[in-house]
Amino acid sequence: MYILPTINIKQIAAAEESTPFFFYDLNLLKSTLERAAESSGKYGFEVHYALKANSNPEILRAISTVIKGADCVSGNEVLAALQHGFKPEKIAFAGVGKTDMEIDIALENNIFSLNVESVQELEVINQRAGLAGKKAPVALRLNPGVNAKTHHYITTGLEENKFGINPWELEKVLEVLKKLRNIELTGIHFHIGSQITNQDPFRSLALRANEFNHWFRKKGIYLKHINLGGGLGVNYQQPDTESIPDFESFFRLFADVLELLPGQTVHFELGRALVAQCGTLVSKVLYVKSGINTNFVILDAGMTELIRPALYQAYHKIENISHPEAPTITCDVVGPICESSDCFGKAILLPQPERGHFIAIRTTGAYGEVMSSNYNLRSKASAYYLEY
């Protein structure tokens, strides 16, 4: 059972006199990383941290001491990974729209793999590699047709999504590959979506990976690695009772189902599962406003600090850490941004908030700070860290 260190949070808030801010419990982060490394390591699996979840420099430094691999989706993420301790031979570079400059960054730094999502991208990488006098290691990102059964904005493994290569394109891809002298096909890559809390999609993915693996082998192509992406979800409803995801069950499923050929390595790209629970967005109540049908609790944090509720209708647990024992009221918790979508939760029960109370919005270590903006010319929220 995790206990949010509210005393430390309130001390920071009082000392800095500035909210909103992100609070990161680096002790919980370390425990999460160690659990993930232990669970994956027993099966010989390699984990790459997905920087898109959180690229805070302190977070990256902490992760790179335990998780050696990185999953990047931009050239700047590749550079950040290198700068903060990740080794180039452990960096995978995905993304449906890599620019020439980003491809050059990957080639210059001799990274592990460029995960390719179209025939035209293969041709461009071949051209850039030729100019650099190098052979580019690539993995083909394939659409396995597995429905992740998650929010439609974060489902990525279907033919209707913009990502990846469809099975019916593979024959053409192999024909093109035969002509590309500056490309080395090293593996295949999948990513079916994010915040997946049911094991069934992962089992379906493993079975489809087996089919693709054997298909390539029949074509005389031996794949050095299979990258199964990420997607493991976290418990947003009860962050204290499940502060660390069940990595053991996740990795064991793939170990049981995958049919690997001798020497093949298996890779995963976890982001949210590693960092979500260690982060909390701390805000202050500005006003409590009575409406016709509800009460509005207006915070100094808004969708500029945490856009997930507005973008995905995502749930985050909200707590009054100043007066947790107060009688509860039903309220809408909203921000100060000039948008009606700037709302963290509707009709929620919250211990009676008052002006100046500190509010904790939980499980914001993933896709919180990294997706923040300065819309309305808002200042960027600071970050503070707890490490005993």
Image (cartoon, helix red, strand yellow):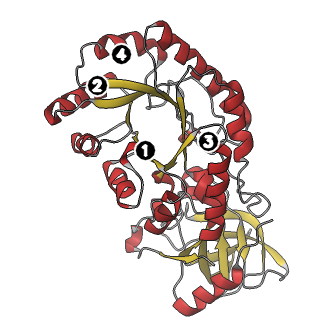
Q: Is residue 241 above or below residue 189?
A: below
Q: Give the amino acid at mark 1.
A: Lys
Name, please, the residue furthest toward the left: 131
The image shows residue 233 at horizontal and vertical percentages of 66, 47
Q: What is the CA distance from the residue labelled 1 to the residue labelled 2?
A: 19 Å
Say few, some or many: other residues with alpha carbon within 10 Å of mark 1 (under 14 / 14 to 19 / 20 or more): many
Q: What is the CA distance from the residue labelled 1 to the residue labelled 3?
A: 30 Å
Q: Give the amino acid at mark 3.
A: His
The mark nearer the N terminus, 1 or 2, is 1
Residue 373 shown left or right of residue 32 in the figure: left
Q: Report the number of discs.
A: 4
Query: Which-is-in-front pick, marks 2 and 4?
Result: 2
SS at circle 2: strand
Q: Is residue 205 above or below residue 66?
A: above
Kindly identify which numbered label has been placed on residue 173: 4
Q: Give the amino acid at mark 4.
A: Val
The image shows residue 386 at horizontal and vertical percentages of 60, 77
Query: Which-is-in-front pick, marks 1 and 3?
Result: 1
Q: Which residue is mark 2?
A: 183
The mark nearer the N terminus, 2 or 3, is 3
Residue 136 shown left or right of residue 339 in the figure: left
Q: Which residue is mark 3?
A: 151
